[in-house]
Amino acid sequence: MSEGSVSDLLSKSVWFPLILLIMGLVLLWMGNRELIQFQESLPDYITLRPDSATLWLLILGAASTAAGIAGLLRSENF
């Protein structure tokens, strides 16, 4: 193993994008679950917005999933 910084190790490894992908999918799953619970608790005649935490879970999950997929596609080992 050649000497290098941690960022060199992470950029050449397939593990970091894979972890990002898994984390993103988990965040999307959690955000979707929160959104479904929010929608089930509302009567049909009330149209409210979901909680900001739900939106952040969905946004961060989508961003992390996209970064993980992009990292896997750019990886030399994949």
Image: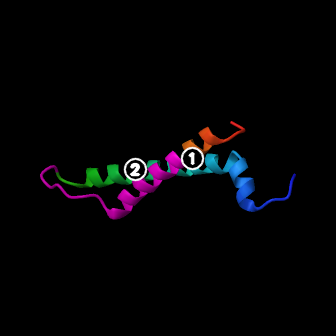
The answer to whether residue 27 of the structure is visible from this angle is no
The answer to whether residue 9 of the structure is visible from this angle is yes
Query: Where is the C terminus found, in terms of image quarters?
Result: top right
* Mark drawn on residue 78: none
Task: Look at mark 2 in the image and give the residue it sits on.
Answer: 33
Residue pictured at 39% horizontal, 49% vertical: 32
Magenta stretch, residue numbers: 44-67
Task: Look at mark 1 in the image and give the residue it sits on.
Answer: 68
> Observer-nearest residue: 26 or 73?
73
> Observer-nearest residue: 12 or 22?
12
- Whether the magenta-drawn stretch holds residue 21 is answered as no
> Which of the two discs, 1 and 2, labels the residue nearer the N terminus?
2
Residue 44, percent across and down? 16, 49
Instruction: Name above or below for residue 53 compared with residue 45.
Output: below
Task: Tell me the kind of residue under disc 1.
Answer: Gly
Task: Tell me the kind of residue under disc 2.
Answer: Arg
Residue pictured at 86% horizontal, 54% vertical: 2
